[in-house]
Image (cartoon, grey):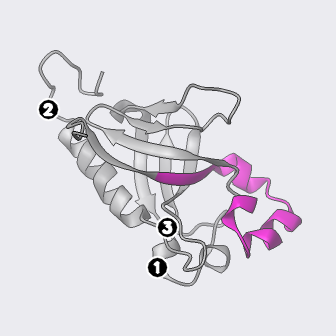
Amino acid sequence: MTRDPAVWQTGDYLGATAEELGHTTPREMAAAGVSQHAQFHRHGVIVLTSGELVLHGWHGPDRDEPLVLRRADLLDVGTRYTGLYGRFVGGLLNAGKPLILSTRTVGQIYLLIDWKEFMETTHDRQWAAAVKAWLASGRAVPEGGTDDGR
């Protein structure tokens, strides 16, 4: 099997919007101490390609289309604890900070990529670096394309 050169990176994610995390019930918050699935109801495969960031499964098992984000859709990328997802729930280690994407299309998205339940670790810092590099790489217009990857 040959690797698609357009694919930069792939992984599994758990996700939620800031709005969804803001409506977390006390029961879900307590359950999140055992499993982040209690707060992060969205899950699937995340793929970063040369032209877009794709969240497969974002809309649930009944809808086939993924959430597709292009460079122009992203306003900010980073990893940090917030009032919606803090150190108490995310783990005491620096490795548990969520990847937060601020988007024009769906607001803030919180992601835990390649989350390991027992260790409470993710690959979010690596993904933040990859997405930032991807954003920077799109400043030059590729042949036949636009600066937002389309």
Residue 29 in the image: above or below residue 103 = below
Q: Nearer the viewer, residue 91 or 62?
A: 62
Of label 3 and label 2, which has the lower sequence position?
A: 3
The residue positioned 49% from the left and 67% from the top of the image is: 80
On-image quarter of the C terminus: top left
Residue occupying the far bottom of the picture: 92
Residue bearing mark 3: 80
The disc at residue 140 is: 2
Residue 77 in the image: above or below residue 118 = above
Residue 44 in the image: above or below residue 122 = above
Q: Position of residue 145 (x, y in %)?
A: 21, 19
Q: Secondary structure at mark 1?
A: helix
The residue positioned 43% from the left and 62% from the top of the image is: 124
**Which mark's residue is nearer the viewer, 1 or 2?**
1
**Which mark's residue is nearer the viewer, 1 or 3?**
1
**Alpha carbons under labels 1 and 3: distance apart:** 9 Å
Q: Which residues are magenta?
A: 12-38
Of label 1 and label 3, which has the lower sequence position?
A: 3
Residue bearing mark 1: 94
Within-10-Å neighbours for mark 2: few <14, some 14–19, many 20+: few
* Residue 135 lies within the magenta run: no
Q: Quadrant of residue 36?
A: bottom right
Number of marks drawn: 3
